[in-house]
Structure formats: C-alpha cells, structure tokens
Image (spheres, rainbow, N blue to C red):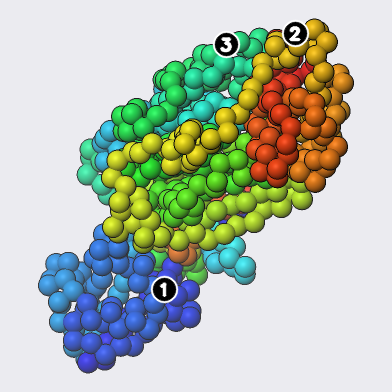
C-alpha cells in the first residue's frame, strides 16, 4: 500500500501534462513503514535525462540525480521510496520495458496522459522474483 | 583485499537488512561475485540472463563509475568502498523497439479490449500479440463453440475454422456457436457469422473440408496454434502428428458424458499426445459422444480451458498445460492433474522418431473394414424394408439393445429390450426359430450384439437394422423422437 498526501496526485498530474507529449518522471520521497506500506511526504520532479528523441517513450533518472535526491531527502529524515513517470497516450500499466528495468521494493506510480490530459494514476511494485508488477492500493491522506 | 560494498535501500531485503557487506576481492567484478555468492537472490537484480551487469545498475569504486574505468576488471584495494547505485529507467515500449511487426490497435479496438489493456499481463503489447496471432480450430462442435467465441472476443487476429458438417437439432444442446435458425446450414457458415458478430475486427477463414492426411500439413503451416475440438481417435492422432511435424502447439480437449480432459501438447516444449497414448484404444471400446452422451455444459468448461491456454500461449505465459493433463469430473465437480513427461521413445516426437509423414489414421485406429477377418458378413435391413416386411405380416422379432433410459426416450413398437451388456447372458430370451432384427440408436451397438451372439453360438438368423432407431424415425415414423 502507498499513502499519498492530499495534493500529490495533482502535482504528478500537472507535471505529466506539462511535459506531454514527452514522458515526465520524478522521485517519491517519504518513509518505509510497517508491513511494506510507504508514506509519501513529498514529490520531487526530475527532468527526463533521456536524449530528446527518446523522451516521448523513455525516462531515465541518472544515478547522480538519484543520489542528489537521496541526500535532499535525508536532510528531512526521508528516503526515496519510489518513482513516478507518465505514459503519454498509453494506459497506466507498467510496460515490459518498465519491468525489465525495475528495482524491487520501490513503488512505481504510472500516470496515463491522453491527448495532454492526465487520466488514470496507478501504483505498482515489482515482485522480488522480477516476474511481474503487482498493483498497490493508493490511499490519499486528507490534507 | 577487504572491500566494503554499500547496498542500496531497494536491495537490503536480500542482504538480511544489511546496508554494508564486507568481501575479499581484487576487482570490482570479483567483489560482486562474492556478494552474490553470499546473497544469491541479489544476483537476478544485478545481472541479466546473459550474466551481464544490468544497464540500470551502476557500480562506483570510491565515487568513480567502473564503466569509465575497466568495468568488472577495475582493481580494488584494501579499504575501498564499492557503491551499487540505481539509475531508474522505464517508459512505454514502442512499436519500433519491441515489436516492429506487431499490428497497432485502433481507438475502437482500444475501447473494446480495455479490460485486457489495464492488466500488465496483457497490456498493449499482449493485446497486439493477440491481434498478430493466428489460430486454427479443428471442429466447431461442443468444444469449438466456446473456443471460437472466446478467441474472437479476445481479439485473436486470424481464426481459421475447419468443419464439413451441417448443424442438426441434436447439436444445439451444447454447440452454442450455432442457433436454432442455423439448423441445416453448414457449420462453418453458421460459426463464421456468429464470430463476425462477436468481433468484426478479426479475420475468419473457413475451410469446409474434412481434415485429412493430405491437407493437414498445408493447413497447419499457415497458423501459429492448433486447437483440437474433435471427438474421434483418427482425427486426434492426425492433429497430434501434424502439429509435431509442423512444430505447432496442439491445445487439446476431450469430453465424454460428465468427464473432460485438457492439455497442451507441444513437442518442442514437452510431451505430445502419443507420449501419453502411444496406441489408440481398440475400435468400439471407447464410445463417442453420439453413443455415450455428454452433458451439454461440459464442452463449455473444457473448451473455455482450451481458449484460456491458447490465449496464454500467445501472451507467452509460463504456467500453461504443457506437460500437464487436467482431468475434470463435472458430476463430482472435481479437477485433478497429472504430470506428463516426454517419451524419448515416442514414435513421432522421440529421439528416433519413425513417423516422418502423416499416415492413414483410420487404419491406424483399426477402423478400416478388413473383409478377410470378417467372414460372416453382417446381414442388414433398412428401416423402410423392415416396415414393409412387418406390414406384409412376416413373423419377425425385434430386439432393442439400447439402455433402458434410451428406451424411455424413444422406442419402436413391439420390440423387446435387452441392453447390449446383457445380450449374451439373456440369449435364451431370443427365439432362434424366428428371424431376429436387432437395433440400437444408430446401428453400431446392434452390430456388436449380433457379433457377440454369433460368437456365443446363437443358432438363429440375426439381421441388423441399418441406421438404428434414428433411421426408423427418418424413414418410417417421424413421431419417434430422435435424440
């Protein structure tokens, strides 16, 4: 399960619409809680490091960007607990490419953007054996 | 050299929660080998199937990326720190990258298949694989009906159907692809119309022919997967052998009364039908559904299992019925499962296979008439002739060898019922001084009864009613129900 703050969904949606038709991406900062739950306290947008032509269907967060994000998170006592990215004109379902490149434990939020407007937002976690993504329940805390 | 490896948060679950692991190594690659030897689960996250470091795994020795040094051979010395740092990649898989040959989906198709698209196991890629796939269905009967309807609904792009039969009223109790208005139509026409109505986005190819050793290989070559919906042994062996010879998976199902079987026979991946049953049963031992009956809903269950397996094969699912035989008993409502194993001595898919081309399957199953072995030719009478002889007052006794429940459905007036299984034991109830006409539903069991009586030494004259009570209903008395 993943808990989002009241405005996080809108922030991710706004980022995905801003970058459409390219893919957007960013970090989910928060804490790992008991029972595998993740509580998100901050959305950390990152620019897509991919070369221009690949941005429409690829995102890449470089290791140094991730380390910067981790350091920033650490100053507030937080961890990087997952990532979000958009699927322009595709469903909010992880692709085979996503699975191939996923890390365990982290949450992967995917937001579908159709004709420039953010639609579905769903969260996924990869099984430890890398066989598939399993959908996570999203809870939104009242702000 | 003692080196410290920093473990990223995501991977600590595989190191027992440890954020640092000490290993002895002289290169970065060796350090990672030592680490994954201690914590085997880690390996699949760091290395791919070709044993190369995954593209999104970055290894730093004292803040320097090893990719900018000597890679896995980068030397490490005592007290060095190795860091595993993720880079995060993902995104939609594009047409050009994964599947340049897969067809794209129109907006109408995306709307139609949305319940598939929102599951990662199918998704856009899987749905496009379904659209690119071609499946050949043998038969549009009880099994073929749900197979065809669900494959069409699922969006399998090209479906071929092979059948030569005509829709009859007795089909409709289970063959839900056909309707009452279709009685008398060729089954492939009726099936094609139904499938087109279910999904106009797919191609339906009709083959109005009996599947034979002459046409099977050419037909199968044109499809990815073959689904066997037949109800007789010659065709079952023909489908199996043709699938082995063309390398296609054979999605198998069979039904009888309340029991069904399903499996996927795919010689490339596991057992074929002959690995399971190398020889057919003797002719007549296993009755078909026309003789033995079948619960109408049973092929619905077995056929939907076949459709499910077909879709999973197209999607590339791992846990298919390859090397598994699923048995279903509707009366007990129980599923059971047997493991199958490829037979190295299998005559068609084994190491020294002897069958390299299709054979005569009627003969293989012992169904070719062999006159020299049957010196006592069976004496037969047609229903019309029998009527005439009865009308002219000839003294005939008629013995019905069907089961009691069949007798309750329909009977010919003035007959005596002795079910096939009791006919020899109750031989003394048949008067040998009179001419005897034996009948059953279609003429097969009464011929067996005559053979059994002759074998047992019955001295009287025995005549078989050709076509059984069904012919009687057709030719003589339409008020006798057909079943």
Q: Nearer the viewer, mark 3 or mark 1?
A: 3
- In-front residue for pair B217/B32: B217
Q: Is residue A55 visible?
A: no
Look at mark 2 in the image and give the residue it sits on: B388
SS class, disc 2: helix
- In-front residue for pair B153/B437: B437
Seen at 86% across and 19% down, the residue is B413
Badge 2 local density, few (<14 within 10 Å), some, or many (20+)?
Answer: few
Seen at 40% across and 48% down, the residue is B266
Answer yes or no: are tags 3 and 1 on the same subunit: yes
- In-front residue for pair A28/B117: B117
The subunit carrying tag 3 is B
SS class, disc 3: loop
First in sequence: mark 3 vs mark 2: 3
Give x and y (percent) for residue B140. Answer: 54, 26
The subunit carrying tag 2 is B
Look at mark 1 in the image and give the residue it sits on: B41
**Spatial CA span between label 3 and label 2:** 33 Å
Look at mark 3 in the image and give the residue it sits on: B185
């Amino acid at each position: 399960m993943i808990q989002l703050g009241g405005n996080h969904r809108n922030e991710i949606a706004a980022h995905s619409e801003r970058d459409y038709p390219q893919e957007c991406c960013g970090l989910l900062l928060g804490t790992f809680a008991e029972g595998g739950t993740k509580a998100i306290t901050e959305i950390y947008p990152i620019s897509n490091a991919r070369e221009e032509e690949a941005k429409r269907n690829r995102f890449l967060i470089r290791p140094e960007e991730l380390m910067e994000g981790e350091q920033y998170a650490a100053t507030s006592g937080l961890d990087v607990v997952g990532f979000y990215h958009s699927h322009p004109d595709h469903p909010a379902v992880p692709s085979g490419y996503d699975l191939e490149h996923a890390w365990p434990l982290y949450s992967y939020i995917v937001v579908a953007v159709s004709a420039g407007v953010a639609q579905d937002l769903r969260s996924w976690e990869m099984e430890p054996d890398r066989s598939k993504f399993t959908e996570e329940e999203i809870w939104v805390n009242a702000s | 050299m003692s080196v410290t490896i920093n473990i990223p948060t995501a991977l600590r679950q595989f190191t027992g929660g440890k954020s640092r692991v000490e290993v002895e190594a002289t290169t970065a690659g060796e350090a990672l080998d030592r680490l994954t030897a201690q914590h085997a689960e880690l390996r699949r996250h760091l290395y791919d199937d070709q044993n190369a470091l995954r593209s999104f795994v970055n290894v730093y020795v004292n803040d320097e990326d090893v990719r900018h040094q000597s890679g896995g051979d980068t030397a490490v010395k005592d007290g060095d720190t190795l860091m595993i740092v993720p880079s995060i990649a993902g995104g939609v898989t594009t047409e050009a990258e994964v599947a340049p040959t897969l067809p794209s989906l129109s907006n109408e198709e995306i709307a139609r298949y949305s319940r598939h698209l929102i599951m990662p196991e199918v998704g856009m890629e899987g749905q496009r694989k379904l659209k690119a796939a071609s499946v050949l269905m043998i038969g549009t009967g009880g099994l073929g009906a749900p197979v065809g309807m669900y494959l069409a609904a699922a969006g399998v792009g090209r479906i071929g159907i092979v059948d030569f039969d005509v829709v009859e009223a007795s089909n409709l109790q289970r063959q839900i692809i056909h309707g009452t208005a279709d009685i008398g139509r060729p089954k492939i026409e009726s099936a094609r119309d139904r499938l087109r109505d279910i999904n106009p986005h797919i191609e339906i190819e009709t083959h109005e022919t009996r599947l034979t050793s002459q046409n099977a290989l050419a037909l199968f070559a044109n499809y990815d997967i073959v689904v066997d919906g037949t109800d007789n042994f010659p065709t079952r062996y023909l489908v199996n052998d043709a699938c082995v010879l063309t390398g296609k998976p054979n999605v198998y199902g069979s039904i009888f009364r309340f029991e069904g079987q399903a499996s996927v026979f795919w010689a490339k991946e596991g057992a074929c039908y002959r690995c399971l049953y190398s020889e057919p049963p003797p002719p007549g031992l296993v009755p078909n559904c026309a003789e033995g009956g079948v619960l109408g809903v049973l092929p619905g269950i077995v056929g939907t299992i076949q459709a499910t397996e077909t879709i999973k094969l197209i999607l590339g699912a791992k846990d298919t019925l390859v090397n598994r035989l699923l048995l279903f008993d509707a009366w007990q409502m129980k599923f059971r499962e047997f493991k199958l194993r490829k037979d190295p001595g299998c005559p068609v898919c084994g190491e020294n296979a002897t069958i390299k081309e299709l054979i005569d399957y009627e003969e293989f199953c012992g169904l070719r008439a062999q006159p020299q072995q049957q010196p006592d030719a069976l004496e037969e009478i047609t229903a019309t002739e029998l009527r005439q002889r009865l009308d002219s007052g000839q003294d005939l006794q008629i013995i019905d060898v069907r089961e009691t429940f069949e007798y309750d459905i329909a009977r010919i007036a003035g007959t005596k019922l002795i079910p096939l299984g009791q006919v020899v034991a109750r031989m003394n109830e048949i008067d040998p001084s009179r001419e005897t006409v034996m009948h059953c539903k279609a003429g097969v069991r009464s011929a067996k009864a005559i053979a059994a009586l002759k074998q047992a030494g019955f001295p009287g004259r025995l005549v078989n009613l050709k076509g059984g009570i069904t012919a009687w209903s057709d030719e003589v008395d339409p008020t006798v129900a057909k079943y």
